[in-house]
Image (tube, grey):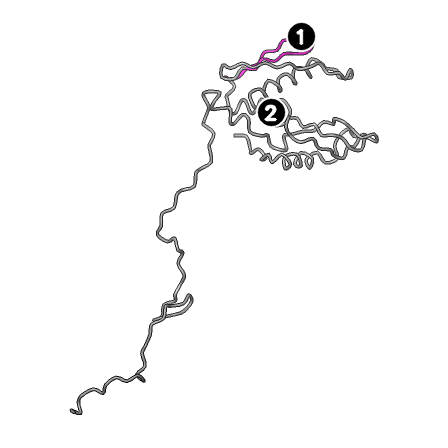
């Protein structure tokens, strides 16, 4: 045998094996990092929320925005039923007529809605027209004889009921009946904002955003 021949391999010859790198391990001066499994894969863009048209031109376009809830701070409470000691009362939610006016002006435009009123023996009838569609509602004269302006009260009730026929403010009628602490001397609820928040939460009503 030639002395220049290589010796045959034996079972004792070590075999080098390459192991997969671990996250955080450095090889050749480079740190191994973990890449997301979906790297390079295309993702569908999220569906953007609906946006209010610059100015609706039909009732169908305006309806979804008219029916949105009012902001909680725009909702007030008047007492309904009371306990005998008058320390607790049933909250009756409502919004001032100006809140309705503002919503109609902003969504429909002042030129696309109008009202007319007719006094009757039973109360006042309000005919509300939005984008050429008219709906009417009756407002009752208040039973409380201490009301100095029964016709005005009936007019406001008729207007809000006509608005509800279009969906505006209708959700107020479906808020849960909620009792709260009442101050009979001041004739007001102790925490009206907290009571309104409780109503919204129980009914799972989203707080209305800033009017735009």
- For disc 2, the marked residue is 170
For the point 70% across and 27% down, which residue is it? 92
Which residue is at 41% across, 61% downward? 34
Residue 116: within the magenta?
Answer: yes
As measured in the structure, the alpha-carbon distance from the residue carrying label 2 to the one carrying label 1 is: 25 Å
Q: Is residue 189 visible?
A: yes
For the N terminus, which image quadrant? bottom left
Please give the residue where the numbered disc 1 appears in the rendered image.
120
Front-lying residue, 100 or 84: 84
- In the picture as drawn, the residue positioned furthest to the left comes out as 2
CB-based contact (under 8 Å), mark 2 and mark 1: no
- Residue 185 in view, yes or no: no
Residue 177 within the segment the image draws in magenta: no
**Disc 2 element:** helix
Near-viewer residue (111 or 42): 42
Residue 6: image quadrant is: bottom left
Q: Give left or right: position of 57 versus 116.
A: left
Instruction: Find the residue positioned furthest to the front.
Output: 11
Of discs 2 and 1, which sits in the foreground? 2
Badge 2: few (under 14), some or many (20 or more) residues near its Cα, within 10 Å? some
Crowd class of label 1 (few under 14; some 14 to 19; many from 20; radius 10 Å): few
Residue depicted at 66% across the width and 12% down the height: 124
Q: Which type of secondary structure does the marked residue at label 1 adopt?
A: loop
**In x, y percent, where is residue 5?**
18, 88
The region drawn magenta spans 111-128
Residue 61 location in percent, x, y? 47, 24
Q: Is residue 23 above or below residue 9?
A: above
In this view, 208 is above or below 44: above
């Amino acid at each position: 045998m030639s002395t220049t021949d290589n010796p045959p391999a034996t079972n004792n010859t070590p075999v080098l094996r390459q192991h997969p790198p671990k996250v955080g391990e450095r090889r050749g001066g480079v740190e191994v990092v973990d890449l997301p499994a979906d790297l390079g894969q295309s993702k569908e863009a999220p569906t953007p929320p609906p946006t209010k048209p610059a100015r609706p031109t039909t009732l169908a376009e305006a309806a979804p925005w008219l029916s949105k809830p009012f902001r909680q701070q725009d909702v007030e409470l008047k007492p309904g039923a009371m306990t005998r000691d008058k320390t607790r009362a049933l909250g009756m939610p409502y919004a001032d007529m100006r809140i309705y006016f503002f919503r109609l002006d902003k969504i429909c435009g002042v030129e696309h809605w109008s009202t007319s009123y007719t006094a009757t023996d039973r109360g006042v009838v309000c005919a509300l027209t939005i984008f050429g569609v008219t709906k009417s509602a009756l407002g009752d004269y208040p039973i409380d004889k201490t009301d100095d302006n029964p016709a005005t009260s009936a007019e406001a009730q008729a207007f809000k009921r006509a608005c509800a026929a279009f969906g505006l403010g209708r959700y107020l009628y479906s808020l849960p009946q909620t009792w709260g602490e009442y101050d009979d001397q001041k004739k007001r609820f102790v925490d009206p904002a907290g009571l309104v928040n409780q109503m919204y939460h129980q009914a799972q009503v989203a707080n209305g955003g800033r009017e735009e």
